[in-house]
Amino acid sequence: MSSPRFEENPVKMKAEEYLVVERDQLADSELEGYQFGGAKVCLIFVDLPPGGGPKLHRHPYEEVFIVLEGQAKFTVGSNTVEATAGQVLMVRPGVPHKFLNSGSGRLRQIDIHANDRFVTEWLEG
């Protein structure tokens, strides 16, 4: 069985069991699993200044936010949640959500989409 080829992706194939991806070579700091050996997950490496964040949207799958540094104000459905470094927030499928860097420094987090490609319905302009 031959190894799959990933000529268009910044991937180094080490063995058929795993891949190594260089984060700094990902377009927009995003990884869609289907482009990397069929992984069933997508990742976004978030690094935002104060006041930055996406508009209200939803996905047909669960999204997990891992706050690594800073603080964020999340709107999840009709709830407002303040999250800080070290916390993990999980949003259920179909629930509208957005977040904003509510701190005075950078917001760094990893957003995990439980799907092999991004599927986003934008609810604000």
Image (tube, rainbow, N blue to C red):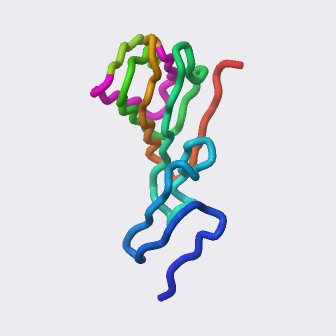
Of residue 96 and residue 105, the one placed in the foreground of this image is 105
Give the left or right position of residue 11, taking residue 16 as reference. Answer: right
Give the left or right position of residue 5, taking residue 85 as reference. Answer: right
Q: How many marks?
A: 0
Compared with 62, 32 (above or below) is below
Of residue 121 and residue 16, the one placed in the foreground of this image is 16
Bounds of the magenta segment: 85-101
Say which residue appears at 55% left-offset and 45% top-offset.
30
Q: Position of residue 112 (x, y in %)?
A: 43, 41
> Residue 37 colored magenta?
no
Compared with 47, 50 (above or below) is above
Q: Point out the residue furthest to the left here.
A: 86
Q: Quadrant of residue 70?
A: top left
Of residue 59 and residue 72, the one placed in the foreground of this image is 72
Q: Position of residue 54 (x, y in %)?
A: 58, 24
Compared with 69, 64 (above or below) is below
Q: Quadrant of residue 64?
A: top left
Q: Position of residue 42 (x, y in %)?
A: 49, 48
Q: Position of residue 29 (x, y in %)?
A: 56, 43
Q: Point out the residue furthest to the right here.
A: 125
> Residue 100 colored magenta?
yes
Compared with 123, 32 (above or below) is below
Of residue 124 and residue 44, the one placed in the foreground of this image is 44
Say which residue appears at 50% left-offset and 63% top-offset.
38
Quadrant where the image shows the C terminus: top right
Say which residue appears at 55% left-offset and 13% top-offset.
51
